Image (cartoon, rainbow, N blue to C red):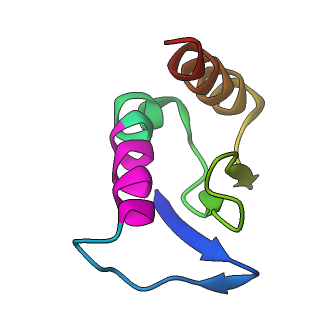
Amino acid sequence: MEVYGTINGSTIQRDAYDLDYIHIDVIRDFVRSIEKVEINPDASIEVDLTYPESPNYRLINCSPEFEERFHKIIHQRQAV
């Protein structure tokens, strides 16, 4: 499943030293742990980092079960 970041609607490029991209790597790890429940090969996640302190997650073509698990993981992460 593809996980990619955007800022102001434009896809950001990989930069190993960019803190925004580290956030995307963390989201990729979360997704890797639950992606087996997603059966749609065209599913993807856009991480909008226009406001890095409150990223917006856009789940594209994802199943309801995957969306539920994803949001549960994100909610647990924010509670820590």
Q: Is residue 4 magenta?
A: no
Q: Position of residue 24 (x, y in %)?
A: 43, 56
Above or below, comparing residue 31 to residue 44 in the picture: above
Quarter occupied by residue 78? top right
Above or below, comparing residue 63 to residue 41 in the picture: above
Q: Position of residue 23 (x, y in %)?
A: 42, 51
Q: Is residue 24 magenta?
A: yes
Residue at point 74% right, 54% down?
A: 58
Residue at point 71% right, 22% down?
A: 68
Main SS of residues in magenta: helix
Residue 37 or 73: which is nearer the viewer?
A: 73
Residue at point 44% right, 39% down?
A: 31
Above or below, comparing residue 3 to residue 80 in the picture: below
Q: Position of residue 49 (x, y in %)?
A: 63, 63
Residue at point 39% right, 65% down?
A: 21
Quarter occupied by residue 30? top left
Quarter occupied by residue 54? top right
Task: Give the left or right position of residue 71, taking residue 31 as reference.
Answer: right
Task: Give the left or right position of residue 57, taking residue 21 as reference.
Answer: right
Q: Position of residue 76 (x, y in %)?
A: 56, 13
What stretch of residues is rendered in magenta?
19-29
